[in-house]
Image (cartoon, rainbow, N blue to C red):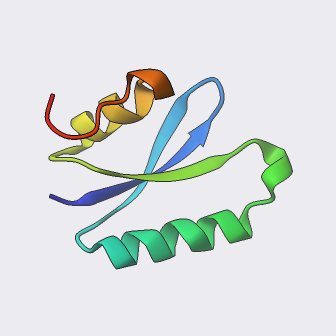
Amino acid sequence: MPYFVYKILQPLQLTHMETQDQYRDARTLVRRLRKEQPAAEGVQYRMVFANNQAEAEKLLSRPPDERVIGED
């Protein structure tokens, strides 16, 4: 399963940035994007491990208390 990297603006606007096959590549990309983006602008960069882009967006759209770790 690939890692999907998203830019998140409030109120919950998800923008797919890139898809990576390796965790290390996705982590490096997210860290670079976070470093380049000033924190004051309210932009978040997140990566999620999912079967496809639709599942990734569904996981990122859930409120934090509803996120499930593992199988649904």
Residue 30, placed above or below residue 28: above
Q: Quadrant of residue 12?
A: top right
Percent from the top left, x then y, of residue 7?
A: 54, 48
Q: Is residue 63 at all visible to an observer of this figure?
A: no
Percent from the top left, x then y, of residue 53?
A: 25, 43
Residue at (28%, 39%) from the top-left corner?
69
Residue at (72%, 69%) from the top-left corner?
36
Percent from the top left, x then y, of residue 70?
A: 20, 40
Q: Is residue 55 left or right of residue 28?
A: left
If the image is split into quadrants, where does the N terminus sit? bottom left
Residue at (22%, 70%) from the top-left corner?
21
Residue 54, placed above or below residue 25: above
If the image is split into quadrants, where does the C terminus sit? top left
Of all residues shown, which one is farthest toward the right?
40
Residue 53, placed above or below residue 36: above
Q: Is residue 27 left or right of residue 21?
A: right
Count of numbered marks: 0
Q: Is residue 20 left or right of residue 33?
A: left
Q: Is residue 65 at all visible to an observer of this figure?
A: yes
Percent from the top left, x then y, of residue 26?
A: 39, 69
